[in-house]
Amino acid sequence: MNNLLVMKFGGTSMGSAERIRVASQITAGERGARPVVVVVSAMSKITDLLLDSLRRAEAGDDVGLEADIEKLRERHVAACRELLPPDGHEAAIEAVHRLVGEFQRIAGGVLMLGVRPPSSVDEAIAIGERLSALLMAAHLEAWGVRAVAVSGADVIVTDAVFGSASPLMEQTREKARQLLLPLLEAGVVPVVTGFNGATADGRPTTLGRGGSDFSASILAASLDAAELWIWTDVDGIMTADPRLVPEAAVLDEVTYSEAAELAYAGAKVLHPRTLAPLVDRQIPVWSKNSFALDKPGTKIVSKLDAQEHGPRAVTSMASVALVSLEPASAALSGTKAMARALEALSASNAEVLMLSSSSYRQNFCFLVRKDELAAVLECLESTLSLELAHGYLRPISVDENVGLLSVVGEGMKGTQGLAGRIFMAISRENVNIIAIAQGSSELTISIVVRRDGLEKAVQAIHAECRIGEQAHLHKE
Ligand code: ASP
Ligand code: MG
């Protein structure tokens, strides 16, 4: 299929009848020129509401559950009424009732049994996206653009890691092409639910919170799309969080590596796993703002025409914890301690945000998200129980009063003096540096500081390295 465009609309871009109307207009406009596949998130806050309902159900709170379900139904029925002509909304409202009924049935099971099996949770929370896809497809149809809602479960094949599944790309490619290409050839816009998939034997899964971006990139790769556009509520990828740094600017272009690094380091604009499926096929991605159609957005490409020297952006993460391990006796080598700790980390499935050790005999530390800390500690304590019990290892220490900042840019490679300037800028703010890491690709320098110095340090680095003042940037 030539010139295929995949467009993903996030929760805020689908957040109300008015926003769905804008998303549909964008779709209709592009559809005039080329085939389009749309991928949608649930309406903003709906996934949170669904998860909350299931927690209430598990706790036996049937009144709270009923109230949540009523909110779910009411918001989507109201959107149907606003979006569709009076003689056309009955069928859509009925379909909303059916999907809400499906959710109610699963939540009812959770209420009765007092447990939330992960596979039931995945089946239930995907209903948020199925509702928004239904609304958008019905709206497009009502305005003369042929469209059909498709569940991600019918096109994305995943492993069985419920709540954070990974795609099986070959099987997905086959399934997606089989179902979606005939629709596209017939001139129909498939409106696919983001976030969800299913195992090869048909059990529903989800790709993790914020996973609709990932769904869109999986489909773009599977269909050999010409481009992927990700519509959000910000102007693109920025040099820093504008709430922390008023001078932050939108980047015209970044590389896949830079964008992925920024996403993993806390820039909220893209789901971290989004770019991996696109790199091989070099499918360009645009991050665009559906609230500001005149802004060009950021283009993500494999290589920049002229790579700038120095950092492109600085990000920060506040809800993190630093875990430190230290051998206490010669009976346990530092290397062995690290090997065992990494084994435990991999078993916990947590993401390691940075890792540092100045000497293999000494202290070794790594940073994880606070909400993954309990799982990490549990795995560490069980994997290292003997070493801890025999005193070969000092008690594991945890510091939750820290923050991570990451300075990112491909052009930092080989640029001398940069680390010095970054550290000077931080020290001028009287912020103490607790741990540092830079991989040999020199793409990112990660620095752990006291939590209360994090914002000051980000501002100081942005100013010192004149990030945002370089070429290829448009200032707001
Ligand atoms: N609706 C899902 C979430 O809120 C997926 C997404 O928005 O990308 O996590
Ligand atoms: Mg979202």
Image: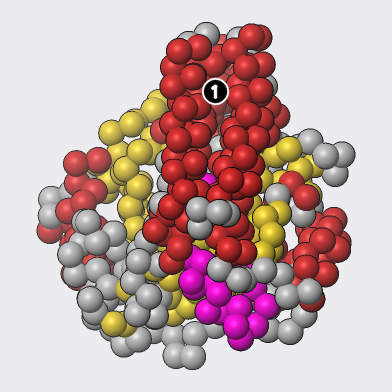
Residue 43 vertical placement versus 240 (above, below): above
Please name the residue shown 30% across and 39% down the image. Answer: 402
- Quarter-of-image position of residue 205: top right
Q: Name the foreground residue: 434 vs 457.
A: 457
Residue 347 vertical placement versus 455 (above, below): above
Q: Label 1 sits on what residue type?
A: Leu
Please name the residue shown 19% across and 46% down the image. Answer: 453
Q: Name the foreground residue: 130 vs 245.
A: 130
Q: Is residue 35 magenta?
A: yes
What percent of the width, then of the height, locates residue 385?
Answer: 60, 16
| SS assignment at label 1 | helix
Residue wearing tag 1: 54
Please name the residue shown 63% across and 47% down the image. Answer: 91
Q: Which residues are magenta?
A: 23-43
Q: Name the foreground residue: 448 vs 189.
A: 189
What percent of the width, then of the height, locates residue 343?
Answer: 65, 35
What percent of the width, then of the height, locates residue 174?
Answer: 86, 61
Query: Is 187 on the left-hand or right-hand side of 91?
Result: right
Q: In the rendered view of the protein, which quadrant contains the C terminus?
A: bottom left
Query: Is 215 on the left-hand or right-hand side of 11?
Result: right
